[in-house]
Amino acid sequence: MTSHQDETVQQIRKQYNFRPFVDAPASNEKVDLLDLTVIDLSKFDSGPDARKELATSLEKALTEYGFFRVVNHGFSPEFLDHMKSVAQSTFETTDEVKSKFFAGETKIEEDKDLELGVIRGTGFKPRGYWKYSNDTPDNVEFYNFRHFLHPEIFHNRIEYPEFVQYHLDDIRKYFSELHTEVQRKVLTLMDIILEIPEGTLYNNFFPAIENDTLNSGTGFGRFLLYHPVDQEYNKKTSSTWMRGHTDAGALTFILSQSILSLQIRSYADNQWKYVSHVPNSIIVNIGDTFKFLTDGYFKSSIHRVHTAPEDQKNYTRNTVIYFASPKLDIYMDSGSLASPKLKRLGYKLDDGLERITVRQWDEAKGKFFNKTSANRKTNLTLYGRESVGSLIGENPIQV
Ligand SMILES: [Fe+2]
């Protein structure tokens, strides 16, 4: 970077109140906490026995509740703190600037056949775009990124707000390495669970081929900011912001942060529990795509975003998420995997269900999560498959 560029970055950072990210103090309230299975990826390269051991603990987590945590993933704590700082400052601009970069408004050739909109498209979803229950405006802003596996498209063909533009290298590094390094290792452990050759899932379903969107795995990254709300707001929304739902994609990677807010509903006892925080870890969950790909062997857990406990309720909650999906033309059932394990256990596509692709499911579900479905009161059935949750609005899930 030349000294002139460096000066420009410093000026832009000042405009966007760029500052270190500081985690809110840990909660001291007595709440039900769920400690997720920890997958230590530093053991991944220690040979087949070590991988087998990791795969065994991962299998338990995936088949019981579909959530786990990865540590020693390869990102330094300093880099993760930097990403959180970049994420928090992305929102430190005017409504006018945000409106110029509204998610889903910008179309590029590669996205022309996709239903993008606010849920999937590059750009901002402003606060209050949706309504929660009792007509309460939502309290979440987010900014989506696409195409970070494809530098030519990511850097040259998409327009970004000035602050984002000057941090694209770091943003691309984070999301693309999550895809090619962290996710590749997780997928390899899944290969071991499914008794298919190591590398099958990554190479055949999620490859990253630069500037070839059709033949690459896909997905989108997201910076999120939940604003603190008052008691009245919590009363109106029953303290639940994002309602119970499962994710549409294959794997979701969430940077762990200290504010207790993400809750998982246990399949064992149907109770909601906060997911605990482990500094510098990444929380991972299975989405519908992997549930379907394994014909139900892996669980796609129902989760939601709930008000934080009393001692954390006045803090802004920032996080960074990557929603990863395989190639869009993959058929989402165990016929695509040819897994001896699933065959032996009897997992197969239900009789009478047509085969559907990742693209069909993603578009059908994504469409309902855009504005038109803001207050859905029932679960959706799409292509004969249940899509759990309304995201927002009244909660159709019995708790
Ligand atoms: Fe989710």
Image: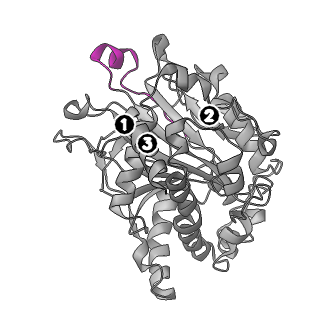
C-alpha gap between disc 2 and disc 3: 18 Å
> 353 or 207, which lies in front?
207
Q: Residue at x 67, y 29 (%)?
A: 368
Q: How is the image coloured?
A: one colour
- Pick whichever of labels 2 and 1 is earlier in the sequence: 1
Q: Is mark 3 within 8 Å of ligand 1?
A: no
- Pick whichever of labels 2 and 3 is earlier in the sequence: 3
Residue range highlighted in magenta: 228-245
Q: Could you tell me residue 393's position as x and y percent? A: 52, 21
Kind of residue at badge 3? Ala
C-alpha gap between disc 2 and disc 1: 30 Å
Question: Circles 2 and 3: CB distance less than 8 Å?
Answer: no
Q: Is residue 164 above or below residue 136?
A: below
Q: Could you tell me residue 40's position as x and y percent? A: 39, 71
Q: Is residue 265 visible?
A: no
Secondary element under disc 1, as helix, strand or loop, is helix
Question: Which residue is the site of mark 1?
Answer: 14
Question: Which residue is the site of mark 2?
Answer: 119
Q: Could you tell me residue 240's position as x and y percent? A: 40, 27
Q: Is residue 13 above or below residue 97?
A: below
C-alpha gap between disc 1 and disc 3: 15 Å
- Membership of 6 in magenta stretch: no
Kind of residue at badge 1? Lys
Question: Circles 2 and 1: CB distance less than 8 Å?
Answer: no
Secondary element under disc 2, as helix, strand or loop, is helix
Q: How many marks?
A: 3
Dominant SS in magenta: loop
Question: Which residue is the site of mark 3?
Answer: 87
Q: Could you tell me residue 391's position as x and y percent? A: 54, 31
Using residue 359 as the reference point, say whether residue 30 is left or right of it.
left
Within 10 Å of disc 1 (Cα), the crowding (few <14, some 14-19, many 20+) is: few
Q: Is mark 1 within 8 Å of ligand 1?
A: no
